[in-house]
Amino acid sequence: MTRITLAAAVLYTAIGWGAAWSAAPATPPVVANPVAASVPPVSDSTADHGKFKELQKKFASGPEVTKACLSCHTEAAKQVQKTKHWTWEYADPKTGKMLGKKNVINNYCTTTISNEKDCMACHAGYGWKDATFDFKAEDNVDCLICHDATGTYRKLPGDAGHPVYERREFPHGSGKFVEAVDLSKVAQSVAMPKRSNCGSCHFYGAGGDGTKHGDLDSALKMPGKYLDVHMDAKGLNFTCSTCHATSGHQVSGSRYDMTAAKTGPAHMRGKADAAPASCQSCHGDKPHKENFLHAERLNSHTDKLACQTCHIAEFARDSIGTEKSWDWSTATQMGPEGKPIFIKDSAGRRAFDSKKGNFVWDSYLIPEYRWFNGHVSFKAKGDTIDPDKVVEINHPEGSAGDAKARIWPFKIHRGKQAYDTENKMLLVVHTAGEDDTALWRNFDWQKAIETGMKTAGLPYSGKFDFVSTEMSWPITHMVAPKADALRCAQCHSDHGRLQGIDGIYLPGRDRSQAIDTIGWAVVLLSLLGVLVHGGTRVYIHYKRKG
């Protein structure tokens, strides 16, 4: 009895000490300052661009604005031209293979090749309409796409990256109009990038709000805490660059080169950091600081699990949702009257488009899980495929035995797209444009493929079909409040979230029949022993009394 009492006292003391250790000091009441409330807010910038003579004039084009910017920011364009945002290229450090939007094929809009005039609405430059684009011309750099603070700067598909210079109906025939951009106003109001700047491209990748990533959509412009604890507009209010720290216009963090695991304590901001966009950069690899015993148990998971696995239990957590699949094989099918049709699903999201095929959308999705060490291998233009299997356009690498790998959450986008049945390669299709060979204009697959493959400099046999494909997108935004993190049983169970993950022993999921048999035998024998012992004592007790 004394030992039990002592053990209980030690446990009670440890739990109490852990709770006290993790308790935050009381927050003092906030007293309103009527004088401060009447003072207008002070700009974070040390310069008022509206007072610069170079910007106090009418600009006829984006490049004219850039020339004015460079009269002071002399090195800015040179810096931008060394980034992936400019080149749309990336050399895989492991293989040397050239990747980036300029080279890879995806299972959304498929490729930028031969479709530059449309795709460059999301390029940080002006005038990229084909292979003749001058990547060295500094006035081709678009400063305003990232630094507009008015919310009025707009670039549309078909303009090769130029903003809207004249009022225009868009989409054509919709009755909706986009106003011309007041370049002088925008130039005089520039500021550091906000979520809306980055989101003007990254929220709308693949031609629609929330389409591509699953954890990025327009709801993050002004999100609540439920949607993202870091970007919460009334809370921490992180901008993208709070995590994606930038130096010389080089933005840290890339889906081509990720840090899947990082060890050690939190990093001090301001000092050089190879992976400032990682969770561990701020939180360290032992982030849990609640009750001591509970925190130790949670922190022991960080050598196998990415933070995102527990703290982003669902993605696309809003009515916008995200695209789950895109089937190109039904594109060019017309309506009953032989004309193109567009059909929406019950939530108002695209379900079928004669130009593009069938789509499936959803919200509040549970991720799929993979071992991931930060390196992703990609299919690029001209790579051969095996059409008898589902083609992995990109493949997250990593395994249980890889020290750099952790179990990560992914959005898996599934598609069906055109491939060359003779040469066994995914096809470059000329989809966008006003010419007679663009698929979205003439609905002729053969013409569109021939033009796309010729532009890409690749052979085409003249025969095509459609193949099933998959793309994996790591989920790392939309971090939920800690109260909404995964619970133990959601993984530690027979049909838990990690049932497809190999290489680890997971209590609650994994078991050995032999060990289970021995264990239950011990339990039953112990119970039998207790019953025999108790029965014997009862028998002896009554025997003595009798």
Image (tube, rainbow, N blue to C red):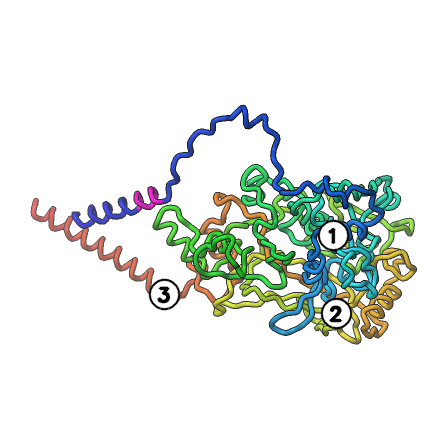
- Res. 226 mark: none
First along the sequence among labels 2 and 1: 1
Secondary element at tag 3: helix
Secondary element at tag 2: loop
Give, as a single range, the part of the protein colored magenta.
15-21
Question: Is residue 454 within the magenta segment?
Answer: no
Please say if the residues under marks 2 and 1 sit with CB atoms less than 8 Å apart.
Answer: no
Residue 249 percent coordinates (x, y): 65, 56
- Res. 515 mark: 3
Residue 468 position by quadrant:
bottom right
* Residue bearing mark 1: 71
Q: Of 72 and 131, which appears nearest the observer? A: 72
- Residue sitting at the far front: 53
**Residue 34 to residue 200: above or below:** above
Question: Mark 1: few, some, or many residues within 10 Å (few <14, many ≥20)?
Answer: few
Q: Amino acid at mark 3?
A: Ile
Q: Along the horizontal axis of the image, is 27 left or right of 412?
A: left
Spatial CA span between label 3 and label 2: 52 Å
First along the sequence among labels 1 and 3: 1
Which of pointers 1 and 3 indicates the residue nearer the eye? 1
Q: Of 87 and 92, which appears nearest the observer? A: 87
Question: Mark 2: few, some, or many residues within 10 Å (few <14, many ≥20)?
Answer: many
Spatial CA span between label 2 and label 1: 40 Å
Q: Amino acid at mark 1?
A: Ser
Residue 327 percent coordinates (x, y): 75, 58
Give the quadrant of the C terminus: top left
